[in-house]
Structure formats: structure tokens, C-alpha cells
Image (tube, rainbow, N blue to C red):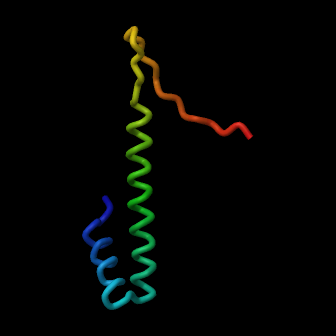
Amino acid sequence: MVDLERINFLSRKSRTEGLTDKEKEEQKLLRQQYIDSVVGSLRCQLENTYIVDEKGNKKKVQRKTDKN
């Protein structure tokens, strides 16, 4: 689980008094963990999403692919 309290603490500290190099690295790592958590949660939710048309037919949402 991502420690939002620590992320917020480091953010406030960076605005007021600044961060040490070690704290900057910790902040970067925590932010990336948070982003990965949100993206993973969204991906899971979309994998279990269906669209129902006016006739009641369910169709699973498909992942869009690049065609380059």
C-alpha cells in the first residue's frame, strides 16, 4: 500500500524548507508507486467493464491497440 501521508509530508516539506537528496529519491519512488497503484486499479476496473446496447447485449470493453 502506498503511504499517502508520507507523500503529502514530503510535498509540504519541499515547499517550505526543501528536501535532502535522500528525501527527493524517496519522494520520487513513492510517487511512482502511487501512479503504478492507480494505473493498476484502473486497468483492473476496465478489464471488468461491459457495455450494454439498447437491445440488452453485453459487450466486453476491448483494449485499444496502436496501428502504426
Q: How many marks?
A: 0
Image quadrant where one finds the N terminus: bottom left
The residue depicted at 33 percent of the width and 91 percent of the height is 17
Picture layout, residue 21 above or below residue 5: below
- Report whether 9 appears left or right of 61: left
**Residue at image point 58% right, 35% down:** 64
Residue 3, horizontal then vertical, whole percent: 29, 66
Residue name at image x 33 percent, y 77 percent: 11
Image quadrant where one finds the C terminus: top right
In depth, the one of 51 and 3 nearer the eye is: 51
**Residue 4 % position (x, y):** 28, 66
- The answer to whether 39 is drawn above or below residue 34 in the figure is above
Q: Nearer the viewer, residue 57 or 45?
A: 57
Q: Residue furthest top?
A: 55
Q: Quadrant of residue 54?
A: top left
Can you tell which quarter of the image residue 35 is in?
Answer: bottom left
Q: What percent of the width, then of the height, locates residue 2? A: 32, 62
Which residue sits furthest front? 54
Name the residue: 39% across, 52% down.
Answer: 38
Is the residue 11 above or below the residue 56 in the image?
Answer: below
Q: Residue furthest left?
A: 5
Residue 54 horizontal side relative to residue 61, left or right: left
* Res. 48 image quadrant: top left
